[in-house]
Image (tube, rainbow, N blue to C red):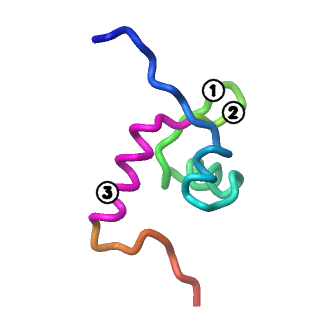
Amino acid sequence: MTGELERLLNSKEVGAALGIHPAVVQRMAIRGEVPGFKVGKFWRYRKSDIDEWIDSRLKSARQPCRIEN
């Protein structure tokens, strides 16, 4: 163990990486669709968790997003 903490991302940074609004990221986190946790009133995300989540979505048979009719 190196003793270093992993940098945490905020909703704005995750939203920019995913190309979606930060409020959408927060709603997805509340529903458990994106790995995140609250620190006080703010949502935070581990970069490694987001990277793994993206990889799992790309590898799964499911589509990475929903298409509404």
Describe the element under mark 3 as helix, strand or loop: helix
Few, some or many residues within 10 Å of mark 3 (<14, 14–19, 20+): few
In the image, is residue 54 part of the stretch drawn in magenta? yes
Alpha carbon of mark 2 to alpha carbon of mark 1: how far? Answer: 5 Å
Secondary structure mostly seen in magenta is: helix
Mark before the other along the chain sequence, 1 or 3: 1
Q: Quadrant of the N terminus?
A: top left
Residue under the image location 32 percent in, 10 percent down: 2
Tag 3 residue: 56
Amino acid type for the residue under numbered disc 3: Ser
In the image, is residue 60 part of the stretch drawn in magenta? no
Describe the element under mark 1 as helix, strand or loop: strand
Mark 1 vs mark 3: in front: 3
Alpha carbon of mark 2 to alpha carbon of mark 3: how far? Answer: 25 Å
> Along the line of sight, which residue is nearer the eye, 66 or 5?
5
Mark sitting on residue 39: 1
Amino acid type for the residue under numbered disc 2: Phe
Alpha carbon of mark 1 to alpha carbon of mark 3: how far? Answer: 25 Å
Residue under the image location 62 percent in, 53 percent down: 15
Callouts 2 and 3 close, C-beta under 8 Å: no
Tag 2 residue: 42
